[in-house]
Image (cartoon, grey):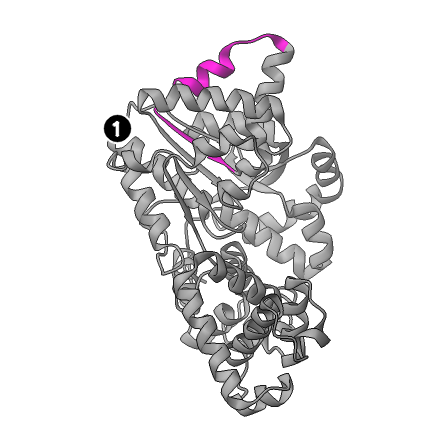
Amino acid sequence: MQSMIQTPDSLLDAVVGVLTDKDGEVVVSTWFRNARAVTVKNDKLYISVPTEMERGVLKEKFTGIVSEILKDIDVSGRSLRPEFITEEEALGISQNASGGYSSKYTFENYIVGPSNRYAHAAATAVAQGEGSEYNPLFIYGPPGLGKTHLLFAIAGAVKKRLPSANVVYAKSEELLNELVSAIKTGRSDFREKYRTADFLLVDDVQFFVGKGSLQEEFFNIFNTLHEKGNFIVLTADKPPRDLALVERLVSRFEMGLAVGIDTPELETRMAMVDDKSRAIGLVLSPEIIDYIASNITNNVRELEGAVHKIKARSSLIDCTIDLPMVQEALRDLIKERPGLHPTPQLILSETAIYYSIPEEKILSKDNSQHVSNARQVACYLMKEMTEMSFPAIASFMNRNHSSIIYSTNTVRKKIEDDSYFESEIKEIRQTIENK
């Protein structure tokens, strides 16, 4: 068995992998979905969760079994035991260690591909102090695609370049909790903390929605920092204009550069699997890398979790890592989904739902613009996502061969010219793949 340096994250991932095999994915995801490894200190693995209720359940029901798993998987010889804490308690620990951000996420270990190249380049420029025109930098995209990684990479690069810089990282929920506490106690350190940042990095600002006092306070923080030329980097699951925030805050967020991160392509996912496996001492065959990357398509965190599950299983039963072993280890994570091999009916149904048009209308002779657009999208997706020929698609759609070719070419051209339409196609395709 290979020796390796075990980080808090890798220990927790291994624990989760073993628990999933033992108790099933539903039980583990219910209680460990929001769990985060904070640090290892005094023979304790500190694990944080958002609420006191979650902490209480984990402490009561999982302390014993997690202690046993840690005893089996920890190669250092320590007698580790878990210490479950709340995120508020974890904040003090992690900020004392590294300003609230994790130093393990760097630009060097961020895998760059077509889906994230623009965001990576902008983040690198900001970290080097060269991106004043990108202030604020607003990075958006679905969960699990590496937005937080870029924030941590910026923080680490800035501290390396400017050790005395005041880099402040916070999740939106933490901002809200600190603001509420400051209002209750009358303390002024909240404003002092955030208005004196040289680099302010805020994660998941979609949680500002519906919180008027927080939006007002952050508007003032933003203005103070921006007027001084200090950098602000924000992340969210949607671009600023799509967030239900007050208009003046949206306009501030759009003052610099808003850049999206898309679902990584197969080649990028394969590079991620290879990189993450090597980082924990595994060398996976191309066949296994392709299997994982082909079946886990939408979330980088799931790719990392898959690698750790393989590592945990191989360590526990000391077996060869081949494809059957990997398929068994990931049986709860990778399930055969219809969306991986969609039928024309599934594509038609999801397109109809997306555009709120009955399927029979798409298949009819109705050539109104809205219906025609949906029909063309369905034809395009059938050609892209299946092995159907143009005549087969034409037969299914009640159209002639030439009209199907015209439809697919029209959609391809529109994707090139219209980024909003391109995002629509990606959203429909992702919905189909997730079925």
Instruction: Give the tally of numbered discs.
Output: 1
Say which residue appears at 50% left-offset and 71% top-offset: 294
Neighbor class of circle 1 (other Cα within 10 Å; few <14, some 14-19, many 20+) is few
Residue 167: give x, y in percent of width and height: 37, 27
Residue 241 located left or right of residue 62: left
The image quarter containing residue 325 is bottom right
Above or below, 354 relative to 16:
below
Taking the image as shown, residue 198 lies to the left or right of residue 323, namely: left
Q: Looking at the picture, which amino acid does disc 1 mark?
A: Leu
Q: As displayed, is residue 45 above or below residue 99?
A: below
Q: Position of residue 221 (x, y in %)?
A: 45, 21
Please name the residue shown 42% across and 18% down the image.
Answer: 195
Q: Which residue is nearer to you in this view: 117 or 310?
A: 117
Q: Is residue 239 above or below residue 129?
A: below
Counting from the top left corner in percent of width and height, residue 241 is at 51, 41
Pointer 1 residue: 162
Q: Is residue 336 visible?
A: no
Residue 356 seen in the figure: yes
Q: Is residue 196 magenta?
A: yes
Span highlighted in magenta in the image = 185-203
Does the segment drawn in magenta span residue 30? no
Circle 1: element type = loop
Compare residues 127 and 396 and report the one nearer the observer.
396
At horizontal 51% and vertical 69% (from top left) the residue drawn is 292
Q: Quadrant of the C terminus?
A: bottom right
Could you say which quadrant of the image residue 264 lies in?
bottom left
